[in-house]
Image (cartoon, grey):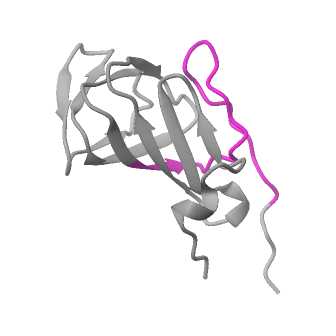
Amino acid sequence: MIVRTLDEITDTDADVRSENWRSKRIVLAKEGVGFSVHETTLYAGTESFFWYANHVEAVFITSGEGEIEDLATGEVHPLAPGTLYLLNDHDKHKVRPRTDITCVCVFNPPVTGREVHDADGVYPLLTEPQPTTV
């Protein structure tokens, strides 16, 4: 069993920040459970382009408001607490928070925590050795 708090992650290597967002990586690939979990805050008034070509991501909004644009279709969807979006087709998208948005993100395959978005908004597919059970 793993029990972890956000306070334990704050200001560690698992607390990753950019100009537009902050992501606290709670569960990572090293745990060997097949997914990773992050609490991410997207900052008000920013616009972020993402394309997870190597991952599927589910995002559940817990606070804040804004919108997400599907760049393939041009559709814009509102984001508010209780909204979930699933990037099941490796969808290229933009997120535009009107207020700070806090969300819980789940990635499959799991991220290692070392990924950095490239110029296309993509995380590379990095792996970790899986723990062995005795």
Which quadrant holds the N terminus? bottom right
Up the image or down, 90 lies above or below 80; here it is above
Q: Residue at x 33, y 15 (%)?
A: 71
| Of 85 and 96, the residue lying toward us | 96
Residue 134 position within the rendered picture, expressed as x and y whole percent measured from the top left = 82, 87
Residue 127 magenta? yes
Counting the numbered discs, the total is 0
Residue 25 magenta? no
> Residue 69 occupies which quadrant of the picture?
top left
> Residue 74 occupies which quadrant of the picture?
top left
| Of 108 and 21, the residue lying toward us | 21
Q: Which residues are magenta?
A: 104-129
Say whether residue 80 is left or right of residue 111: left
Can residue 63 be seen from the camera position used here?
A: yes
Q: Residue at x 40, y 33 (%)?
A: 42
Q: Residue at x 17, y 31 (%)?
A: 78
Say whether residue 66 is left or right of residue 126: left
Residue 39 position within the rendered picture, expressed as x and y whole percent measured from the top left = 46, 50
Direction bottom: furthest residue: 134
Can residue 27 be seen from the camera position used here?
A: no
Residue 67 position within the rendered picture, expressed as x and y whole percent measured from the top left = 23, 26
Q: Residue at x 36, y 46 (%)?
A: 103
> Residue 96 occupies which quadrant of the picture?
top left
